[in-house]
Image (cartoon, helix red, strand yellow):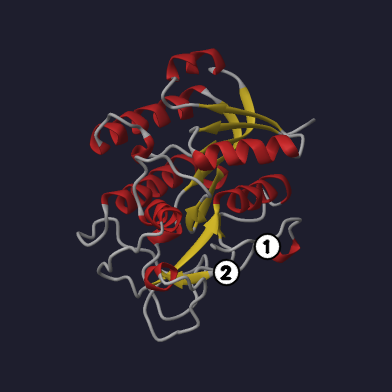
Amino acid sequence: MPLTVLILGEGSLGRSIHDSLNFFSVDARILSIRKTKFLHSIFGCHFDVIVDCMDPGSIEGISYHDSRQYIDQLRVSILDNLCFHVYAYISSANIYAPSLALIDESSAVFDSRSSSISEYIQNKLITEIYLRGKLHDRLRIFRPVSLWKDRYSQGSQGFFPDLIRSRSNGLALQPRPNDEDPISYMHYNHAAQAICHALINMIDCFEVLNISASCWSSRQCLKNGSMYLDDYSQWGRRIVSSTLHLGLLPFSLRPFR
């Protein structure tokens, strides 16, 4: 029987995962969280894998708090009404605490009760804890590094949208606090292909999987046109995976240019 996959969330990563699965002839459907009136039509259906890409920050015109509540309720409804073998949650590698060493799947994460983390990271941590309690061995967690793409809409916010637009317009970005901290980054399409490889070939081989190209720099270096950072004296997130080896995958990793 062919693998059947339902992707929840039609953002950049969700669409990239959908396209990559279709390329590998996987029966994949994608559901926009803005169009959940169609959700009842798949209640009772069985999927081998559900991929949860739902992100509160992706719903325009709704506050983060209201969006988060909406997605939490939607997630409960999906868990109660759909049949599936594996539930794959797209978390974030930014939940790991900064370190001088390389960070893999066994490294320490932030405390979800910490007042020093962003609401976004807190939500990722709390969602991981909730899903572990509900799903146990049916849960798989993907933790991708910071992702970038070639084009952004004018309203997109964040470091990489600002960097892409600044390079397109020939403008320099102003320095910001913590610009010197190492960050790991990867193209959306490459992250999607790595996730698809894991879904198709490794689904029973991991609980948590970092999605990383083992490529890191700092915002300061990237602003100055340097793609890599070789200095290991600064605390930050140099993310690797002890399980997923991207050198074996059939695509060429392209760092930011």
Classify residue 82 by image quadrant: top right
Say whether residue 65 is left or right of residue 103.
Answer: left
Q: Secondary structure at mark 1?
A: helix
Observer-nearest of 58 and 199: 58
- Type of amino acid under label 2: Ser
Residue 69 shows which numbered tag?
none
The residue under label 1 is: 246
Residue occupying the point 54% across, 62% down: 256
The quadrant in which the C terminus is found is bottom right
Residue 12 picture location, percent across and down: 51, 40
The quadrant in which the N terminus is found is top right
Residue occupying the point 56% across, 36% down: 15
Observer-nearest of 61 and 22: 61
Contact (Cβ within 8 Å) of mark 2 with mark 1:
yes
Residue 198 picture location, percent across and down: 66, 51
Residue, far right: 1
Residue 233 picture location, percent across and down: 40, 86
